[in-house]
Amino acid sequence: MKFLQYFVFLFFVLSYSQNNSKYSNEFMNIGVDASSISMSGAVTSSINDVNSGYWNPAGLTAVEQGEISLMHSNYFANIANYNYVAYAKPIDNQSAIGLSMIRFRVDDTLATTQLIGDQGNINYDRINLFSAVDYGFIISYARKMLTKEISYGINTKIIRRIIGDFASSWGFGLDIGLQLKTSNNWRFGLMARDISTTYNSWSINETRLIDIQNAIDGQNQDIPNSTEITIPKIQLGISKLHNINYDYSLLTSFDLIMKFEQNNNLISSEFVSINPAIGLELGYTDSVFLRLGIGNFQNEIGFDNSTNLTFQPNFGLGFKFNNLEIDYAFTDIGDQSVALYSNIFSLKIDFDIFR
């Protein structure tokens, strides 16, 4: 009965969210961990380390010792910097906690509100630079159920966004994740992001707003919304680990990413859009890994109104030395999609290495 009540509540939340901002806190959707990104994020069912705090907190129950993860990548010709750090540790044999932080910063943006003087003269010396920075803090808790094959996890998210001295905001949201493991190496996962419709409240500098409104007569007169709501997203995953022989293993995974909006995804309706993601990981002696992923399928509309299906292929390598793992991912191989390609590096340390 409680599950029914929850889904009725979620339905009304989704219905309400259809009339609100659909694209807020997008920096939280970029992804973390080079190994997961190289598999196109198709890790909802298989993730089982410190990075579970982002992909599916239920996976934290597999953490046996304290773990830390670090990642860095650049976008837009190094103008934008994306950094991630996470820590996780078990509480006992049944539960674990995790802390994650994401930071996305764009530097040296031109502020041209003072470009045109009172007499209509253009003075380039009046151009200033400002930076925009976004922070996402994730507090995770995971626990095994009585059967031990099923685990669940909960994320509490705190969002902080700053746009120079123009505006800033605070946000709050919740995620819920589930994982099921079977005795024959099948795994199933569910990740419900922003189930609380992550809410952002903006504080706008009125003095700077007036500067923007007065920069060009008759333009930029609208007052920005002071609130944003991020609509929920659900990701379902299935995976299986194949032990080929003593030295080799193959992890195959498949995810369905569902957003409650109509967009250019492979499958889309007025209520929900669905996008598949496929990931493969070939391992050798649990020390060298080759990863491939395909995702981000989009029905792109051309200038002649023709539709072209694009996708994003990813590639990655991983090396594990004792309890130290270094991973690399190259996204959008061959520029197949409209997404920007990037080189991503991440580092994971199991604190058992210091024992």
Image (cartoon, grey):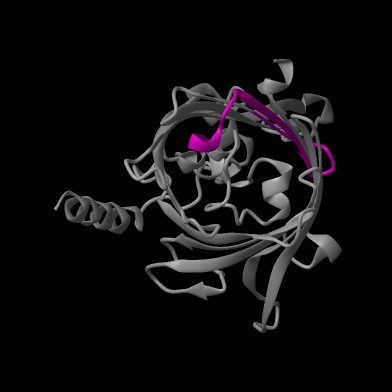
Q: Nearer the viewer, residue 182 or 195?
A: 182
**Residue 118 vertical placement versus 340 (above, below):** above
**Residue 38 vertical placement versus 123 (above, below):** below
Tell whether position 69 is magenta. yes
Q: Residue at x 67, y 84 (%)?
A: 306
Tell whether position 248 is magenta. no
Q: Position of residue 231 (x, y in %)?
A: 41, 51
Q: Residue at x 63, y 45 (%)?
A: 31
Magenta range is: 60-85
Q: Position of residue 284 (x, y in %)?
A: 81, 51
Q: Image quadrant of residue 214?
A: top right
The reply to whether residue 95 is visible in this rendering is: yes
Q: Position of residue 43 (x, y in %)?
A: 59, 52
Q: Nearer the viewer, residue 352 or 311?
A: 352
Q: Residue at x 44, y 24 (%)?
A: 92
Q: Nearer the viewer, residue 48 or 294?
A: 48
**Residue 264 vertical placement versus 17 (above, below):** below
Question: Total label count?
Answer: 0
Q: Residue at x 40, y 51 (%)?
A: 232
Horizontally, residue 328 falls left or right of residue 9, namely right
Q: Position of residue 37 (x, y in %)?
A: 69, 50
